[in-house]
Amino acid sequence: MRTQRTQVAIVGAGPSGLLLGQLLHRAGVHTIILERQTGDYVLGRIRAGVLEQVSVDLLDEAGVGARMHKEGLVHCGFELMFEGRRQRVDLHGLTGGKTVMVYGQTELTRDLMEARAAAGLFTVYDAQDVRIYDFDTEKPRVCYRKDGVEHEIACDFIAGCDGFHGVCRSSVPRAAITEFEKVYPFGWLGLLSDTPPVCDELIYINSERGFALCSQRSRTRSRYYLQVPLTDRVEEWTDEAFWDELSRRLDDEGRDKLVTGRSLEKSIAPLRSFVIEPLRFGRMFLAGDAGHIVPPTGAKGLNLAATDVKYLSMAFVEYYVDKSQAGIDAYSARCLRRIWRAERFSWWFTALMHRFSEDGPIVGKFQAAELDYLMHSQAGLRSIAENYVGLPLDFGEHHERQRSAHPSEFCGHAGSVEGEHSRAAAAIAARFN
Ligand code: FAD
Ligand code: PHB
C-alpha cells in the first residue's frame, strides 16, 4: 500500500474535476485527481457544445480561455422551428448584450488537461476501483489501484466530480439522500461530421416526426441530433438513414443547404432530469453530473457543472485562506437554487420541443400555439433568452437582497427558500458532522 496526502482529493477528470483542480491550483490549494478512464477515452466523448457567459468568464479566471476565444464561435441568437417555419431568438438584443460561446466540451477538456500537465499537477488516469472512506470524519481517505498496486490518499476534503455513474454519490447511505428523477421516453441520436453547418446559428426543431437540433463545433464541423425511441440502437442507424431523417425534419431552405458526409461519431444519449439533495455529506461534496442531470435541450449540463465548481472552489479557498467554514456550509443550498432553475428550464424546453408517443396530435397543436405565443411576446422571448444565456451567478443573493429590501412584496412567504434548503441540508448533513 502506497500512501499520499493532499488537501482536496478530486474523483473524476471530466470538465468538473479538471476545472476545480485548475481553480484550486491558482489559489494555492493542493489537489490530486483520480480518473478511472484513460485521458484519450475522456477526450473521445462527444458531448456539450454551448457555453454560457458565466462559464466563459470562469474559464478565463482559470487561465484556460485563450484557445476558446480564438477558435470558439460567439453566437448572438438561435432559431426555433415549428410548423415548418423558423423564427429567430435574438439573445443579444433580448438580454442587453449577452451571448453564448460555441466551443466543444472535448476542446475545453483538452485545454484543462494541458494546463494541468503544464503546471506539473498530479492526475492519475486509469485509476481502478476508486473507493472513498471516512468522509463523515475529519480525516477522509480515498483508495484506488493502479497497475496492480494499492494506493491510499489522506485528504481534508473529497470532491465527487465523477459524473452520473460515479462512486461518490453511491457511497452515501441512501437514507441521507433525497432523489428527484424524471426519465424521458426517448433519446438523442447525435452525429458529428466534418461538413459545414446548415446554418450560422443553432436550429431547434419541433417537427411532426420528432425533435431535431442542428448544432456545430466550428465553421467546418457540424453536430446534429435526432429524437429517437429509446429502443433504437445506434448500429441500426446508417449515416444515410440519419441524413435522410434529418432532411425530413428540416424546412426547404435547410434541406437545400444541408451538406452531408461521413460521420466521425454517432451515439445515443438517454434524456433525464435528476437532482439529489443535499450536495454535501460531511467532508464530501458532489459537483456537476454527479449531483444532477438535465436533458440537453437547454444546453445547461456543462454550465451547471462549471458554476458548482466555482462555488466549491470559493468555499475551499475561504476555508484555507480565511479560515472560514461559511462557503462550505452554504455550498449545497447555493448550488441547488441555481440547479433547480436550470432543471426547470431544461424540462420545460424539452416538453415544448419533443413529441411524446403517448400524446395525440392535440399536444403538437398545444406546443405550436405556445411557441407562436412566445415568439410574438417580448416577455416570452425575453424569458427564453434570459434562461438560455444563463442566469447571473449571484441571482440568488440579489433576489434575497431585493426580498429583504421590500418585504411587503413577498408577504405570505415565510423565510427564504435558501434558508429552507440550508436547514434541510443541515439536518441531513448533521449525521456526517
Ligand atoms: P462527466 O463529464 O461525466 O465526467 C465525470 C468523470 O468521472 C468521467 O471522466 C468519468 O470517467 C469519471 N469517473 C466516473 N466514475 C469514476 C470512478 N469511480 N473513479 C474515477 N473516475 C470516475 N451541457 C451543456 O452545458 N451544454 C450542452 O450543449 C450540452 N450538450 C450535451 C449533449 C449531450 C448529447 C450530452 C450527453 C450531454 C450534454 N451536456 C451539455 C451535458 C454535459 O456534457 C455534462 O453535464 C458534463 O459532461 C458534466 O461534466 P462532469 O465533469 O460533471 O461529468
Ligand atoms: C451540442 O452542440 O452538442 C449541443 C448544443 C445545444 C444543445 C445541446 C447540445 O442544447
Image (cartoon, helix red, strand yellow):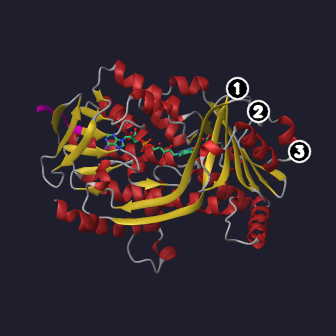
Q: Looking at the image, can residue 29 be seen? A: no
Q: Return the residue found at the far bottom.
A: 412
Give the number of the disc on residue 220: 1
Residue 301 as seen in the image, left or right of residue 156: right
| Badge 1 amino acid | Thr
Secondary structure mainly formed by the magenta segment = strand
Near mark 2 (Cα within 10 A), the count class, few <14, some 14-19 or many ≥20, is some
Which quarter of the rendered image does ligand 1 occupy?
top left
Q: Amino acid at mark 2?
A: Thr
- Tag 3 and tag 2, C-beta contact below 8 Å: no
Quadrant location, the N terminus: top left
Assess mark 3: CB under 8 A from ligand 2?
no
Mark whose residue sits in front, 2 or 1? 2
Q: Is residue 185 above or below residue 245?
A: below
Which quadrant of the figure contains the C terminus?
Answer: bottom left
Q: Observer-nearest residue: 230 or 61?
A: 230
**Distance of label 1 from label 3 (alpha carbons):** 22 Å
Q: Residue at x 73, y 39 (%)?
A: 201
Q: Position of residue 213 (x, y in %)?
A: 69, 46
Image x and y of residue 298, in percent:
60, 52
Look at the image and give the residue range highlighted in magenta. Answer: 1-8
Quarter location, residue 334? bottom left
Dot 3 or dot 2: first in sequence order is 3
Mark sitting on residue 260? 2
Residue for point 46% across, 26% down: 111
Q: Secondary structure at mark 3?
A: helix
Q: Residue at x 33, y 35 (%)?
A: 35
Is 6 within the magenta?
A: yes
| Callout 2 secondary element | loop
Residue drawn at 73 percent across, 70 percent down: 363
Q: Which mark is residue 252?
A: 3
